[in-house]
Amino acid sequence: MTDNLLNFELVSPEARLVSEPVKMAVIPGEEGVMGVGVGHASFVVTLKPGVVGLFAEGQDFTKDIPARRIFIAGGFADISEAGCSILAEEAVDVVTFDAAKLEQELSNLNEDLGIAQEETDKARIQAKIAMTTLKLQAVAA
Amino acid sequence: MPSLRTYRDRIKSVKSTRKITSAMKMVAASKLRRAQEQAEASQPYAQAMADMLSRVAKNVVINASSSKLLVGTGDDKRHLIVAVTADRGLCGGFNATLVKAVREQVRLLQAEDKEVYLVCVGRKARDLLKRSFGQRIWQSFTGITGKSRVEFVEANQVTQFILEKFEANEFDVCTLAYNKFENVLSQPPVLQQIIPFDLSAEEPVQQDNKKEQSEKVEFEGPKSPYDFEPEEERILNALLPRNIGVQIYRALLDSSAGEQAARMTAMDNATRNAGEMIKDLTLQYNRARQAYITKELIEIISGAEAL
């Protein structure tokens, strides 16, 4: 481990998705976005759906965009002296998103919402719409 | 005495059965390897979840107002048992042992005057339990295990169903019944209570080397106080349902690895038995052929003598 780098880990129930040293990780905390560098105070945070940005070594986080951006559908972050580990049930690299496809999906979902009768169905579709909108925003940013 | 042809046909059919069982064994072995890999891959998440839970729980005073998933509904009258089996048979006693354990548990609880409900995961659980507890089965899920991998999203359907029922206050205690994958030869059925969740029961899982090390560090240095955002209670309330999901997912992974292991062993036995059967049949066939030849010789000789 290099001294000034943070051990970052991203695990989903199915696999350990990321495990690498980063300069800083920007995580979408439920009560606000926060940047985590090495030596951050111990913290347990719930995360809302959004983008986790990872700054690689040598990047200037005041100017550059993060080297790697990962979309998560909510989760938890555990920050300790050992590093920062994120538990997410769904995590996808933003670069793999296809804006056109997402827009198509969004319009499909909107159509579904018009058809849906039951309240539970509507709530489910609305949750999906919110998620897809967030994904689209992540691509646009 | 059966004719030679009968023996030949039997031997032929047993041979083709042996071919099938040995192929199934091979398939099960490769699926087992994949299932084991998947179980390993899910380990870090379960570990991290357990670590976080214990860390948060240390900072929370657990009282009656805590999440019901932790303290229970204050009653234990209505029990829900989630029975996890395979979708397919031909895996020895794998499904039968679990169903037997579930049945015993149901009887035990009923003897104590409790209401018992069932949720079946896997076609075999549904088929075998339907006869005795048809009306008690709330829901059956099939097609989750037995594929190349167990998807978390699919495991989550089970979790969501259980949590919805719990929210609706339809049961008090939830127990997960599945075959624990110990090794290729043993997959004993286990009953694990997941609602209300027992935090102290989590401890053995945490006895990982890494965990011990990090704990040591914590004790040696000035203990760093943890900060929580939002408050501990809210984090705990968010963590608990996910933890149920993790427990169920792990049970499904265990069960699917166990199924393949049980099938492998069963098919190995079947192949061996078929081999023995072929040996016996060949012996009988040879004997019959010998008898036939002797008989023909006798007929020729006695015919010649009669002339």
Image (cartoon, rainbow, N blue to C red):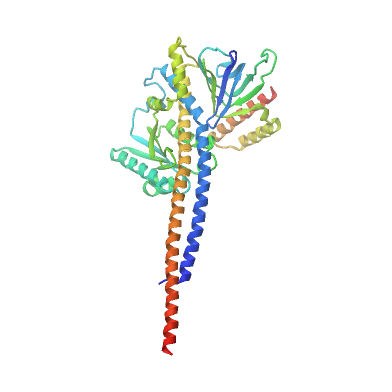
Question: Residue B221: percent from the left, percent from the top?
Answer: 45, 10
Q: Quadrant of the C terminus of chain B?
A: bottom left
Q: Quadrant of residue B202?
A: top left
Q: Is residue A105 above or below residue A28?
A: below
Q: Residue at x 57, y 17 (%)?
A: A1
**Left or right: B268 with respect to A36?**
left
Question: Residue A26: percent from the left, percent from the top?
Answer: 61, 18
Farthest residue, direction bottom: B307
Q: Residue at x 61, y 34 (%)?
A: A113
Q: Residue at x 42, y 69 (%)?
A: B287
For residue B174, say whether it is visible: no
Q: Residue at x 29, y 38 (%)?
A: B113
Question: Residue A60: percent from the left, percent from the top?
Answer: 68, 13
Front-most of B59 and B46? B46
Question: Residue B141: percent from the left, percent from the top?
Answer: 48, 42
Front-most of B85 and B16? B16
Front-most of A44 and B24? B24
**Left or right: B12 with respect to B180?**
right
Q: Quadrant of the N terminus of chain B?
A: bottom left
Q: Quadrant of residue B181?
A: top left
**Left or right: A61 with respect to B24?**
right
For residue B272, say whether it is visible: yes
Front-most of A42 and B223? B223
How many badges with numbers are in the image?
0
